[in-house]
Amino acid sequence: MKKVTFLLAAILVLGVSNIVKAQDGDTDKASHSFGVQINPTALVDIEGVTDFTLTPVVGTEAGAQPFSFEGVQNSAHWLNYTSVKDAKNQTRSITAELSYEGTTLPAGMSIVLTPVTPTSDGQGVKGSVAEAPIVLDQNAEAAQTVVSGIGSCYTGDGAGKGVNLIYSLQLNEDDFGTIEADTYAATVTYTISDK
């Protein structure tokens, strides 16, 4: 009886061992494949005070120019952006374009945008800013480039991060006769695109 019991036990152990091996595929490792998909991203936002008014300083001397644009500026706006490029489009750029709401700025004056190099916040290839004044007026035939060479990056979110946008006024002396007392409403639109 002991021999029969031992023989049955041995058969049972060998059978279970072969079943376990068959389930594991005769190896002590298992694997499977998976993918990672990163979608291209292009986001742009303006942070800071929403609306503002640029008002020249009015002069008091008869016969002199009636106002001065010197020192009249607004630097409370920040251009924040995020970009994840794809293999086809190696860089992106951001442009600015001026449009008017009901009235057109007289030819005697222009709005000037001076962008400042992105702050150290964020990471990646944030592109380059020429830091030269960009004239935005009725003579601009197309959107003006503000930032170029943008790769995969982010600038940080909020005021004080990204590109500081400084707005000022420029007097066009040759067209001074077109200036009239009025309130002029304008909108600057920023667009990020593949370039």
Image (tube, rainbow, N blue to C red):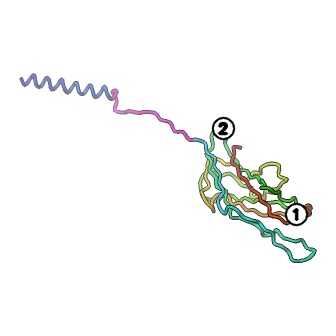
Q: Position of residue 136 (x, y in %)?
A: 80, 56
Q: Given the image, on which type of amino acid does mark 1 rest?
A: Ile
Q: Quadrant of residue 165?
A: bottom right
Q: Given the image, on which type of amino acid does mark 2 rest?
A: Lys
Kindly state the secondary structure of the residue where label 1 is placed: loop
Q: Is residue 32 magenta?
A: yes
Q: Is 67 situated above or below 4?
A: below
The Cα atoms of the two marked residues, 1 and 2, are separated by: 47 Å
Query: Looking at the rendered structure, which numbered label has been put on residue 36?
Result: none
Q: Is residue 172 left or right of residue 112?
A: right
Q: Position of residue 69 (x, y in %)?
A: 82, 68
Kindly state the secondary structure of the residue where label 2 is placed: loop
Residue, x 31% and y 25% (percent of image)?
22
Q: Quadrant of residue 169?
A: bottom right
Q: Which residue does the numbered mark 2 point to in the structure image?
A: 88
Q: Which residue does the numbered mark 1 point to in the structure image?
A: 179
Query: Overall secondary structure of the magenta stretch?
Result: loop
Mark 2 surroundings within 10 Å by alpha-carbon count, few (fewer than 14), some (14 through 19), many (20 or more): few
Q: Quadrant of residue 130?
A: bottom right
Q: Nearer the viewer, mark 1 or mark 2?
A: 1
Stretch of the chain drawn in magenta: 24-38
Q: Which residue of the protein is positioned furthest toward the bottom in this rendering?
A: 61
